[in-house]
Image (tube, rainbow, N blue to C red):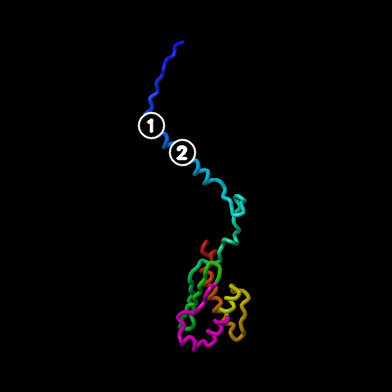
Amino acid sequence: MSAKTKIVVLHMKELIYTGIFAVLGILFVVLLIMMFLPDKDKDGTPGQEPDIAETASLYIPGIYTTELVLGTQSIDVEVIVDKDSITSIRMVNLNDAVTTMYPLLQPTFDSICEQVYDQQSLEHITYTSDSKYTSLVLLQAIQNSLDKASVSSAQE
């Protein structure tokens, strides 16, 4: 039996490159594992989606206006919403000529706004028979503004 001695020469530069690539490979594998494992929620159950009602919002926050033409004059009905509620409704560009020509406009508007703030909805709004048509026009203008603010209309 003859024993032949083999000499292996390792260069320091090659050792350093190999070490760096090994560390990067390990980091890459750990990153992939962390990305594709299911997340754990607060209660510790993996893969359970949060309740849609908790995360979904009703409106896109902002200020939405609808133009309302009364005779030759026009006013804007402005609705301000945050993600879950109606915060403010007001009439913009309302001048004395409109309030003189339509005396039921402001009291009817105030009554509707008060009910909307309480209910956060346009359903079951009550109004007097004296101001039926004024109420219907105002409710339609408010509804148009809320339709613009609705999350479901933005997704379509």
Amino acid marked by disc 1: Glu
Q: Which mark is residue 14?
A: 1
Residue 112, horizontal then vertical, whole percent: 57, 79
Name the outermost residue toward the bottom: 100
Q: Characterize the local packing of mark 1: few (<14), some (14-19) or many (20 or more) Cα atoms within 10 angstroms.
A: few
Q: Is residue 45 left or right of residue 11?
A: right
Mark 1 or 2, closer to the camera: 1
Dot 1 or dot 2: first in sequence order is 1
Q: Is residue 18 left or right of residue 49?
A: left
Residue 113, horizontal then vertical, whole percent: 56, 78
Amino acid marked by disc 2: Gly
The residue lying at 57 percent from left, 76 percent from top is 117
Magenta region: 86-111
Residue 39, horizontal then vertical, whole percent: 56, 50
Q: Which mark is residue 25?
A: 2
- Residue 93 in the magenta stretch? The answer is yes
Q: In the structure shown, which secondary structural element does the residue marked by tag 2 occupy? A: helix
